[in-house]
Amino acid sequence: MIEKQKNGVSFFEFPKFAGLSGILHGVFTRNNGKSKEPFRSLNVSFGVGDNDRAVLENRKIISRCINEEDLFFLDQVHGTRIVVFSKEHHFYRVFDTTDDFKGECSEILSGQADTFGIDSELRFEADAIVTDIPRKLLVIQVADCQSVLIYDPVQEVAANVHSGWRGSIKNIIGCTLKVMENSFGCRSRDIVAGIGPSLGPCCAEFVNYKKEIPEAFWKYKNDTNHFDFWSISRDQLCEAGVLFENVDLSRMCTKCDSNRFFSFRGEGTTGRFAALIGLK
């Protein structure tokens, strides 16, 4: 990944997104924020026990780094719901996956969205968000789970996915691509995706994997009960039709690099760093 600094704040960009003029994106580190230990220091989550004022200031720091754009956060629940915002009448729809691990999903909710941004009263318990509305940054908060940034430069649609191990085995990534296709006419072969810093195969140990992880995923396990969820996500993108050469994999393990990123596995009580994408 490409490390950058703006206003004294460090963040990373995916090389495959660098030449695309239609988006803003970034994966921020844990540094250069206002939070105190154990949330040092650019924590963006209100749900981990940090001081609310510090979290709000951290979110403003990030917004100022990305051209003062609106930030939109989900109430992430380690589930499989996907929120879609459309610029046509500011309409929203919510989808959820089925239980067959094939990336299938169905609409469960819809409505009118009068506001869409950092001060929005709309709150969604979901783990992926898709939009064709410009100047709205879609933020995923992570500390070992994956952020998967997705962009279709043809239809001008952006998405951000929170893929923890539960979301991975339900294929929330494949379902998000299906929602993009059905809602906006996106074609997988046009899509570019980036898999952000997260728990690597070096540290993703699942001692009780036989109870937690379906057998279809055991091929991603090594001899010490460690799973390669980076490869799982890359393969799910490619199985949905995304070209292998259009997938950027950060290969940065959050537990190994806890000086730059928050890691729940490594630290327990800790903050969440931001990964974001939006249309210009």
Image (cartoon, rainbow, N blue to C red):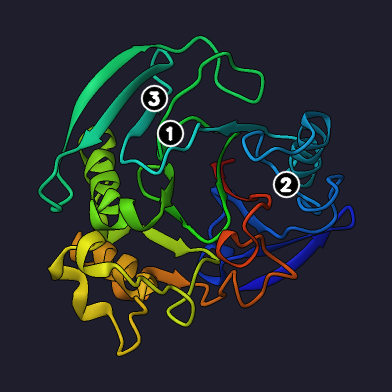
Say the numbered circle drawn on residue 43: 2
- 3 and 1 marks in contact (CB < 8 Å): yes
Q: Viewer-nearest of labels 2 and 3?
A: 2
How far separated are the C-alphas under marks 2 and 3?
A: 29 Å
The answer to which of 268 and 220 lies nearer the viewer is: 268
Q: Is residue 244 left or right of residue 147?
A: left
Mark closest to the chain's N terminus, 2 or 3: 2
Amino acid at dot 1: Asp
Asked which secondary structure carries label 1, the reply is: loop
The answer to which of 184 and 9 lies nearer the viewer is: 9
- Rendering coords of residue 261 (x, y %): 67, 64
Mark closest to the chain's N terminus, 2 or 1: 2
Q: Number of callouts in the render? A: 3
Asked which secondary structure carries label 2, the reply is: loop
Determine the residue located farthest toward the bottom in the rendered image. Answer: 223
Q: Is residue 270 left or right of residue 255?
A: right
Amino acid at dot 3: Ser
Amino acid at dot 2: Asn
Mark closest to the chain's N terminus, 3 or 1: 3
- Residue occupied by mark 3: 86
Q: Residues within 10 Å of mark 3 (few under 14, many from 20)?
A: some
- Rendering coords of residue 191 (x, y %): 34, 57
Q: Residues within 10 Å of mark 1 (few under 14, many from 20)?
A: many
Position of 4 relative to 158 (above/below): below
Asked which secondary structure carries label 3, the reply is: strand
